[in-house]
Amino acid sequence: MANPNHTRFPLFSEARSAETVNARIGADVDARTREIAEAVVRHLHAAVKEIEPTHEEWLAAIRFLTETGQMCTDWRQEFILLSDILGVSMLVDAINHRRPGRATENTILGPFFVDGVPALPSGADICLDGKGEPLVVMARVVDIDGTPIGGATVDVWQTNDDGFYDVQQKGIQPEGNLRGKFISGADGHFWFRTVKPRFYPIPDDGPVGKLLATLGRHPNRAAHIHFIVQAPGYDDVITHLFSPDCQYLDQDTVFGVKESLVANFERIDDEAAAKAFGVANPFWRVDQDFVMAPRP
């Protein structure tokens, strides 16, 4: 005679494994939590059935996740790094920032943003260590109709010419090196002096770096400058400008490059122009519009 205690939930079988697990979710669980949990279980079980891992392979995967968690500190989030190199961070960002046609596209924030950087006057030089090729960034903040947005705040940060952010080299780089905050004028314009960005590797001395090596992938990010553009009533823009001549442009390790974010870096050899901008000759120049969409 069948045990009546077994009639409430289906018992486990390989064929119906996901359905069996999802049947155990409580009746009072909210709809969104249920939707997420059921989807994760379905796709995880489908992957396991496709891969058919051995016990040793599954334990290796668990060890990898354990080591990833153990690598996390206040300054380093190895799970975010894992999400980045698998393209998931960019996918989540794309889903959450679908914007109308000409609005500037988002890309990932990255781990080295520093809040509270003081505002600088337009035209300031943010390169404090004197390394690298001079670059002048001439920029404008506008709405999707091209109308200037005055009073927008723009945070800027990048690595130095050695490929490190200032917070990675405390006591080596000047504090606040290659960081700045600017306010757009009534005409939407702001500009600043910096240096041409260069590529750099993400931290690859942990489990994520080992995974990249196992997959035959390099750890390098394409050369870029970070921007956060904010204005009341508009969706925040978290984005990069990429250098078009970087050898890693089409293989950025965190998939951060979008075609619209590849800027036009113009090399200028003009002593009078260099003097007018207060930079050494020759220098690079970028002219860029940041186009903001209304906040949903």
Image (tube, rainbow, N blue to C red):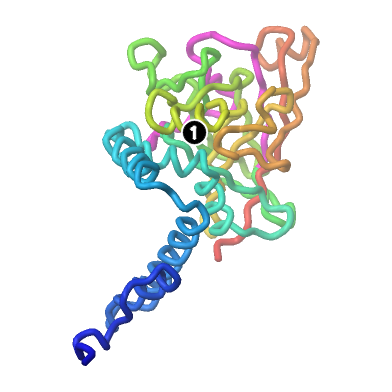
Q: Is residue 23 left or right of residue 16?
A: left
Q: Is residue 153 visible?
A: no
- The answer to whether 17 is drawn above or below residue 93 in the figure is below
Q: Main secondary structure of the magenta part?
A: loop
Q: Residues within 10 Å of mark 1 (few under 14, many from 20)?
A: many
- With 264 as the anchor, is 117 left or right in this view? left
The residue closer to the viewer here, 296 or 257, is 257
Q: Which residue is mark 1?
A: 181
37 magenta-colored: no
Q: Is residue 137 magenta?
A: yes
Residue visible at 20% across and 91% down in the picture: 4
Helix, strand or loop for disc 1: strand
* Displayed quadrant of residue 73: top left
Q: Position of residue 82 (x, y in %)?
A: 44, 40
Closer to the camera, 70 or 210?
Answer: 210
Residue depicted at x 69% and y 60%: 100
Percent of width and height locating residue 80: 41, 42
Return the residue found at the far front: 1
As displayed, is residue 140 above or below residue 199? below
Depth check: give the residue in front, 250 or 199: 250
Residue type, label 1: Lys
Q: How many marks?
A: 1
Whether residue 243 is visible: yes
Horizontal and vertical percent for residue 243? 68, 27
Q: Where does the N terminus fall, quadrant-wise?
A: bottom left
Magenta range is 114-140
Name the foreground residue: 8 vs 246. Answer: 8
Which of the 4 image quarters holds residue 209? Answer: top left
Residue drawn at x 38%, y 78% as measured from the top left:
31
Q: Position of residue 48 (x, y in %)?
A: 45, 56
Q: Quadrant of the C terminus?
A: bottom right
